[in-house]
């Protein structure tokens, strides 16, 4: 779908594999920042500018529910996006692995909009919905013409997904939906638990995600206070805040420059660990001498320009 120098619009923060997939076709990545003030929903004005001003607009990467922010694209957003690209030589890769993790209403796909089956590919996985992460089983939905090309590419590159993995996926679809729905309710409860805890921590502001099992709190105030990047803060929490304990999370800039000032935390842990992680973070971020000492040995994490707290 892409040729060298074609433009591809990506909403940032973004999943880290997107740039490599675009670069291997020689295409260009064009960024549109997602904002907490908009609940991390895509800005259609940026889409319109991309289509009107880019010399060769050919692709859009869409991810909803969104990793890492938990933002959810609404049906109105999708209708507007479809109206902008319908009939144009523009393809949308709609990354939808968290389709069963929408915490308000139901999942909406761009494919449901008129004409979009011919212009979009939606990707799904058993990893999240059915907790089959180690099986690496997923599937794509698109027009018959596109799927035929996928079939050819997959056959020559991968041969096929192992038969027992395919049987496991079929069993999950036929018999595992009650289990899946129970797991999704449990993840929703854990998300709410973690959001509530994080919002009690001084210097942390966390929106309730619309989907996924991630939370994406702003820690810009803490970072500015200690002159440490959010990635540096994540590394400090893991290896510098205590001699025996640590919290594993990711700095928002791991997902692109627009993620600076945020952390991404997963809720896929027991409740007591989530609660302990919040308590650890609350205490660790007050140890300014320890943060300063960590920066002394890791100067690459010094924050040169303060984050805009209002944007975060």
Image: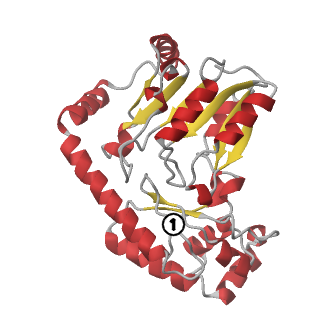
Q: Looking at the image, which residue is at 82% across and 69% down? A: 304
> Where does residue 89 sit, x and y in percent of width and height?
66, 18
> Where does residue 61 sit, x and y in percent of width and height?
60, 35
Q: Looking at the image, which residue is at 51% across and 15% down? A: 146
Q: Looking at the image, which residue is at 47% across and 16% down? A: 143
| Secondary structure found at label 1 | loop
Image height of 234 relative to 128, above or below:
below
Any part of residue 287 in sight: yes
Q: How many badges with numbers are in the image?
A: 1
The residue to which callout 1 is attached is 248
Left or right: 149, with 25 as reference point: left
Image height of 64 relative to 259, above or below:
above
> Where does residue 302 sit, x and y in percent of width and height?
77, 72
* Color theme of the render: secondary structure
Please tell me how crowded label 1 is: few (under 14), some (14-19), or many (20+) other residues with Cα within 10 Å.
Answer: some
Q: In which quarter of the image is residue 58?
A: top right
Image height of 32 relative to 163, above or below:
below
Q: Quadrant of residue 300?
A: bottom right
> Where does residue 103 sit, x and y in percent of width and height?
37, 53
Left or right: 64, with 221 as reference point: left
User: Which image quarter is the C terminus in?
Assistant: bottom right
User: Which image quarter is the N terminus in?
Assistant: top right
Image height of 107 relative to 3, above or below:
below
Identify which residue, 119 or 98, lies in the foreground. Answer: 119
Any part of residue 243 in sight: no
Identify which residue, 21 or 66, lies in the foreground. Answer: 66
């Amino acid at each position: 779908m892409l040729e060298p120098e074609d433009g591809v619009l990506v909403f940032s923060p973004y999943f880290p594999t997107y740039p490599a997939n675009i670069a291997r076709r020689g295409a260009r990545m064009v960024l549109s920042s997602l904002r907490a003030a908009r609940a991390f929903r895509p800005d259609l004005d940026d889409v319109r500018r991309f289509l009107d001003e880019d010399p060769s607009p050919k692709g859009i990467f869409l991810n909803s529910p969104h990793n890492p922010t938990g933002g959810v694209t609404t049906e109105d957003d999708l209708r507007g996006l479809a109206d902008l690209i319908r009939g144009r030589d523009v393809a949308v890769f709609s990354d939808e692995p968290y389709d069963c993790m929408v915490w308000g209403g139901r999942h909406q796909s761009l494919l449901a909009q008129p004409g979009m089956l011919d212009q979009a590919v939606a990707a799904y996985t058993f990893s999240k919905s059915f907790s089959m992460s180690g099986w690496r089983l997923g599937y794509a939905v698109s027009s018959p013409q596109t799927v035929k090309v996928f079939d050819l590419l997959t056959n020559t590159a991968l041969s096929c997904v192992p038969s027992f993995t395919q049987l496991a996926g079929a069993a999950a679809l036929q018999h595992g939906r009650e289990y899946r729905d129970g797991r999704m309710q449990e993840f929703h409860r854990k998300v709410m638990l973690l959001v509530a805890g994080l919002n009690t921590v001084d210097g942390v502001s966390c929106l309730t995600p619309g989907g996924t099992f991630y939370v994406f709190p702003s820690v810009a105030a803490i970072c500015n206070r200690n002159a440490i990047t959010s990635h540096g803060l994540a590394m400090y929490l893991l290896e510098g805040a205590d001699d025996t304990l640590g919290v594993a999370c990711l700095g928002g800039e791991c997902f692109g420059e627009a993620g600076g000032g945020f952390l991404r935390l997963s809720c896929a842990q027991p409740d007591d660990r989530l609660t302990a992680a919040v308590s650890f973070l609350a205490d660790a971020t007050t140890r300014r001498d320890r943060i300063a000492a960590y920066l002394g040995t890791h100067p690459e994490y010094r924050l040169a320009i303060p984050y805009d707290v209002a944007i975060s």
